[in-house]
Image (cartoon, rainbow, N blue to C red):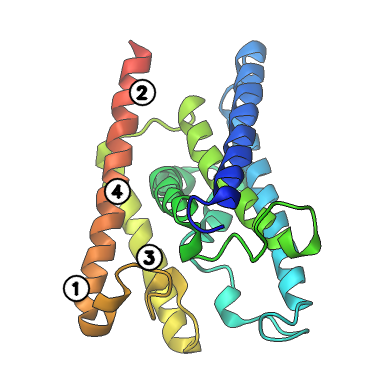
Amino acid sequence: MGNFGSKHLLGLLWVFSLIAVMLIILLSVRKKKGYGRSFDIKVIAGSALFIWMWEIIKTIVIFNSPDYSGVGVYPAWMMPFHICSMALYVYWILGFRPGKFADYIAPYGFATMILVTSLILTIPDSSGIMGNLPNWAIVKENILPYQSFSYHGTLVFVPLYMVLSGYYKPHIKDTFKATIVLFVTALFAFTLNKILGVTDFMTLEFGNGNPFQPILLSNYAMYLLILASIAIGGTALILGIGQVATSIKMK
C-alpha cells in the first residue's frame, strides 16, 4: 500500500485521468467559444473553491475523529499552513483578486506548486496522505485519502491549465518572483512553528516526512540550504521547461 503500491498507483490513475478529462473539456470549450482570460480566471476561481471545500471537509472529519487529538479538538499541526496549503491562498487570489499582485504570484502558483505537489504524489508515504486502508473503497476511513488526492490533483490541474490555456506564459526569469513568494511563505511558516511549538509547517521545524531530516538534527543551516536549493532549482527547471514548451507550441 506504500509508495508505488496498488493503492498509490490506482490513486494516481484516477487522479490524472480526471485531470486529463477536465483539461480536455475546459480547453475545448474555451477554444470553441472563443473565451479568453476572464474564462481562465473563472476556472482558477472554481478550483480554489473546490480545494477550500475539501479543506473544510478535512477540518470537520478531523474535528470529529478520535484518531488525532481527540473528538472536538483540531490539532495545530493540521492547520492549513503547509507548503501545499499555500495553494488555498494563491489560487484564491488568482481567481478572485486578479491584478498586479496576482500576476506577481502566478509563477509561484504555477512552478512551485506543481513541484512540491509532484513530490508528494510521488512519495505519498512521506506525508501520510493514503490513509490506513489498502484500497479506495468508498467508506468513512477513506474520506481523508480521497480529500488528499483530490486536493493535490487540483494543484497539478491548475498549473497545467494556466499554461495550456495561455493564462500564464512561463519564463525562467520569473524564478525570482517565485523565490520571493516562497521566502515570505517560509518565513511565515517558520514564525508559526516557533510560536506554536508543536507544528512543522513546510517541514522547517522537525523535518517530519523529509528525507533530509537527519541533516536537520546535526546542521540546521545546511538543511535549510538543501531545501532552498531543491525548491528554487526545481522551480527554475519547471519554468525553463515551460518556457521552451510554450515557445515550441507558438511556432
Relative image position of residue 227 (x, y in whole percent): 28, 64
Q: Earlier in the sequence, mark 1 or mark 3?
A: 3
Q: Which residue is mark 4?
A: 234
List the residue tagged with mark 3: 184
Residue type, mark 2 in image: Thr
Residue drawn at the location 37% of the way across and 72% of the way down: 187
Q: How far is the residue under mark 1 from the one under mark 2? A: 35 Å
Q: Quadrant of residue 207?
A: bottom left
The residue at which mark 1 appears reads as 222
Mark 4 Cα-neighbour bin, 10 Å: few <14, some 14–19, many ≥20: some
Q: Which mark is residue 246?
A: 2
Please tell me whether mark 2 sits on a helix, a strand or a loop: helix
Mark 1 vs 2, N-terminal side:
1
Q: Mark 1 or 4 closer to N-term?
A: 1
Q: Considering only vertical position in the picture, is 6 above or below 187?
A: above
Query: Of label 4 and label 2, which has the lower sequence position?
Result: 4
Question: Which amino acid type is shown beneath numbered disc 3?
Answer: Val
